[in-house]
Image: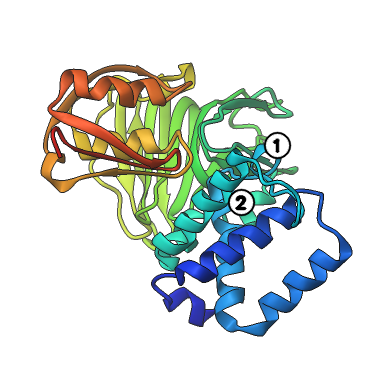
């Protein structure tokens, strides 16, 4: 997205609708050569058109709008209700979501080109050449680089649970290859461990150690090394490491498809739940401080939202399946 479009706060509703129609048509596989020419000319006719089109690409990628049932039929054919709804949903997102938010939430190219990645709501396990097992949480991307001197995993986005396997030679041998995880803020060196690492969206990373220990070395704090031991966790930036504290009891629950919370603010709970579903999950400030406790299944987050009004004085409002807000009951 251009610098100019990044500053644009909203897209004109008419332009958003046109962009949604054209974009979904071209993604449907039913567009003709004339259709493709028409929409190429439309994009070139006005910088606002191109901004809207680029935003459509980012939003559809983030919100899993493509392809299949949301594809538009060719112009002139009967438009089914679900396809009209698809255009309406995409147009609403283009017009309502700030450009800066889209740029922040959409996966950049380096994440899409990562060695291993998961989509929103997906979890899977990867086994590395040495037998190390890595479980990838929702919307996670990693690169793996093993060579003669180092076993390295680069966490581009998301969260991973690592069960490290011993190298082919014992520690202390000159040929031993350390196992490290790199995030945007620093490097973690495993000391025979099972641990969780999360690349957060606030320019911080977080590590929780279930077994063994992990050395944390922030990128911009030369010489600083903090050891986080089994049963501890710590957040860190590129400049500092928080003092290790007690590990959250449910630190690896997500690997079993579970979210366990105790007395969590509703706003924080919805932010966490929102990691596992496409689109926007918003909390009205009027109910943000309500508290949530329980164990929730992550396979399908809709029943979790449906259960909230039974436990709290709230209601769940859905503009579309991609835009949900929790508001006070009776609003």
Residue drawn at the location 24% of the way across and 24% of the way down:
308
> Mark 1: which secondary structure?
loop
On residue 240, which mark appears? none
In the displayed structure, 68 sits above or below 96; it is above
On residue 175, which mark appears? 1
Near-viewer residue (274 or 53)? 53
Count of number-bearing discs: 2
In the displayed structure, 57 sits above or below 10; it is above
Residue mark closest to the camera, 1 vs 2: 2
What's the distance in space between the residues labelled 1 and 2, CA to CA?
Answer: 32 Å
**Residue 252 visible in the shown view:** no
Residue drawn at the location 23% of the way across and 42% of the way down:
243
Q: Quadrant of the N terminus?
A: bottom right
Q: Which residue is mark 2?
A: 111
On screen, residue 245 versus residue 166, left or right, reads left
Image position, residue 162 (x, y; %): 53, 28
Residue drawn at the location 45% of the way across and 33% of the way down:
276
> Mark 2: which secondary structure?
helix
Q: Who comes first in sequence, dot 1 or dot 2? A: 2
Image position, residue 52 (x, y; %): 56, 69
In the displayed structure, 145 sits above or below 37; it is above
> Local crowd at mark 1 within 10 Å, few (<14), some, or many (≥20)?
some
Image position, residue 125 (x, y; %): 62, 24
Image position, residue 91 (x, y; %): 51, 58
Q: List the single residue furthest toward the right.
A: 33
């Amino acid at each position: 997205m251009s610098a100019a479009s990044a500053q644009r706060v909203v897209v004109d509703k008419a332009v958003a609708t046109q962009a949604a129609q054209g974009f979904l048509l071209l993604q449907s596989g039913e567009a003709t050569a004339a259709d493709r020419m028409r929409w190429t000319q439309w994009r070139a006719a006005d910088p606002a058109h191109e901004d809207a089109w680029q935003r459509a690409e980012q939003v559809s990628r983030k919100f899993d709008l493509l392809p299949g049932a949301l594809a538009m039929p060719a112009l002139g054919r009967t438009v089914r209700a679900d396809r009209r709804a698809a255009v309406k949903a995409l147009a609403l997102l283009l017009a309502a979501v700030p450009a800066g938010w889209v740029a922040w939430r959409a996966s950049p190219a380096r994440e899409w080109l990562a060695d291993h990645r998961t989509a929103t709501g997906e979890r899977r396990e990867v086994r590395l050449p040495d037998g190390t097992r890595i479980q990838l949480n929702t919307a996670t991307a990693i690169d793996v680089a093993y060579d003669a001197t180092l076993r390295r995993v680069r966490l581009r986005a998301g969260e991973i649970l690592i069960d490290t396997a011993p190298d082919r030679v014992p520690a202390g041998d000159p040929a031993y290859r350390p196992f490290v995880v790199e995030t945007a803020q620093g490097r973690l060196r495993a000391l025979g461990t099972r641990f969780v690492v999360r690349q957060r969206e606030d320019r911080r990373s977080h590590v929780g150690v279930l077994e063994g220990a992990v050395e944390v070395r922030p990128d911009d704090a030369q010489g600083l090394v903090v050891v986080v031991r089994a049963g501890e966790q710590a957040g860190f930036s590129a400049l500092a490491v928080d003092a290790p504290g007690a590990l959250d009891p449910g630190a690896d629950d997500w690997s079993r498809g579970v979210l366990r919370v105790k007395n969590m603010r509703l706003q924080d709970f919805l932010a966490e739940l929102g990691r596992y579903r496409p689109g926007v999950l918003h909390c009205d400030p009027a109910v943000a401080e309500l508290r949530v406790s329980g164990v929730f299944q992550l396979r399908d987050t809709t029943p979790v939202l449906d259960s909230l009004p039974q436990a709290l004085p709230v209601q769940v409002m859905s503009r579309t399946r991609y835009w949900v807000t929790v508001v006070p009951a009776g609003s």
